[in-house]
Amino acid sequence: MVESDQTRIPEWPEALDVRRLLEQGWRPTPFHQFIVKIHSRCNLRCDYCYIYEMADQGWKAQPRRMARPVVEQVARRIAEHARANRLDRVSVIIHGGEPLLAGVDHLRFALATIRGACEPDVRVDFSLQTNAVLINEFFLEVFLEFGVEVGVSMDGDREGHDRHRLRRDGEGSYDDVRTGLYQLTGSRYQHLFSGFLATIDLANDPVRTYEALLEWNPPGVDFLLPHGNWDNPPPGRPPDDSTPYADWLIAVFDRWYGAKIQETSVRLPGQIMRLLLGRGSSSEAVGLGPVAMAVIETNGQIEQVDSLKSAFDGASGTFLHVSRDPFDTALHLPSIAARQIGTLALATGCRTCDLHETCGGGLYPHRYRTGTGFRNASVYCRDLYRFIDHIRTRLISDLDGFTTRGRS
């Protein structure tokens, strides 16, 4: 028997009373980061991709490329939001799919249109995430013209990368990515390279993976936990007390932190260290800071963070569109307010954890469970606790040693 909508118990945060939050003094944090989906398709077929391979298949109904009138609407809405909220600076991330499929001319049009709508009183910091396969001199000159920082998705050495990041013909993309990287890291464009996104695979040796990425002298590396939740656990995450992902990350952390000279930044442990030392986090993966990010799909729909597509069909949707809705409207939706209310959004068990201010419940999509929605601990709860505790223990030991040496 199918449960009717009338008897269905809302999943968190559907019933979140935003009006009451406002009456109690809460105020939303304006969006300062906008992810613009300039193209909805990809030239690779990565088997772990949350957009194409997981629960939400809405990409099939999206236009392949964001039309120019939609780009213009997006630009006006970003500028409107920044000025209404007295922001003098915003971040715009050009994304996909694979954004370079949009073509050089269209990409230049989008960058120029967004900057033109915002200047002179609102500065736009552009970045772009790519698989690097299509990088060439023409794209690089556009990046140079607009100061676009370029992040590359790469999973380590050839064996680790080609296990999942395949071309449409089923062959590995490692050689194609290296070709693009050689151009990006040339002397003329090297300052535009912002680093790597790498999805963790437990089958890959962690230190070898990290050192393969170091070959390119990246300014930063961000290791991503594979998307999963309580209904669909990530690979190798059994329902027991083991911590395979913490073990993997600890090996990377010890190699990175123990180096005589810092070779790069590694985002997740770096943000954890900031939080443990009483500072804020710029990552939605840890900490309790408000998530102030909006996604605009190729058809102009305003959505939440697109990693939510890994949870269920429609999880990232808002039913808002740049043609009729300002971004301020989205800030008052329960689904977006829930990402900005800190401890109030955590499961009861999380609130009593001694590391909850650092962990922050983990990445929001990883908390999902049918029936209770997103008000659960992360499916990576044990891994996160062990990893954070390892870093905490290491920091305490080093600080104690520093204090002891200072007294001698």
Image (cartoon, helix red, strand yellow):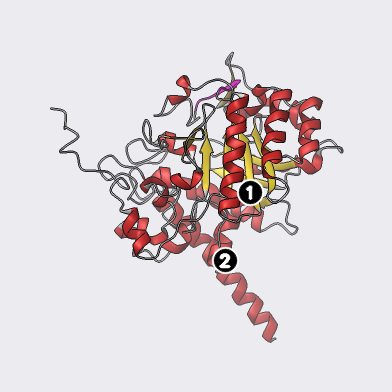
Q: Nearer the viewer, mark 1 or mark 2?
A: 1
Q: Is residue 241 above or below residue 38?
A: below
Q: Which residue is mark 1?
A: 90
**Is residue 107 on the magenta stretch?**
no
**Is residue 45 on the magenta stretch?**
yes
Tell me where residue 248 appears, x and y as whole percent: 53, 46
Q: Is residue 196 above or below residue 139?
A: below
**Residue 365 visible in image:** yes
Residue at the (74%, 27%) spot, across then down? 135
| Front residue (pair 225, 383) | 225
- Amino acid type of the residue tagged 1 in the rendering: Val
Query: Mark 2 falls on what kind of element?
Result: loop
Query: Mark 1 falls on what kind of element?
Result: strand
Q: Quadrant of the N terminus?
A: top left
Q: Could you tell whether 239 is left or right of 217 in the image?
A: left
Residue at the (46%, 59%) spot, across then down? 288
Q: Which residue is mark 2?
A: 279
Question: Which label's residue is closer to the chain start, 1 or 2?
Answer: 1
Residue at the (73%, 29%) spot, across then down? 108
Residue 138 lies in quadrant: top right
Tell me where residue 32 appears, x and y as whole percent: 58, 50
Q: Is residue 34 above or below residue 387?
A: above
Per the model, the C-alpha gap separating discs 1 and 2 is: 22 Å
Q: Which mark is residue 276?
A: none
| Front residue (pair 31, 205) | 31
Residue at the (45%, 20%) spot, across then down? 61
Tell me where residue 329 appears, x and y as whole percent: 44, 45
| Front residue (pair 322, 64) | 322
Q: Magenta stretch?
A: 41-47
- Amino acid type of the residue tagged 2 in the rendering: Arg
| Front residue (pair 218, 294) | 294
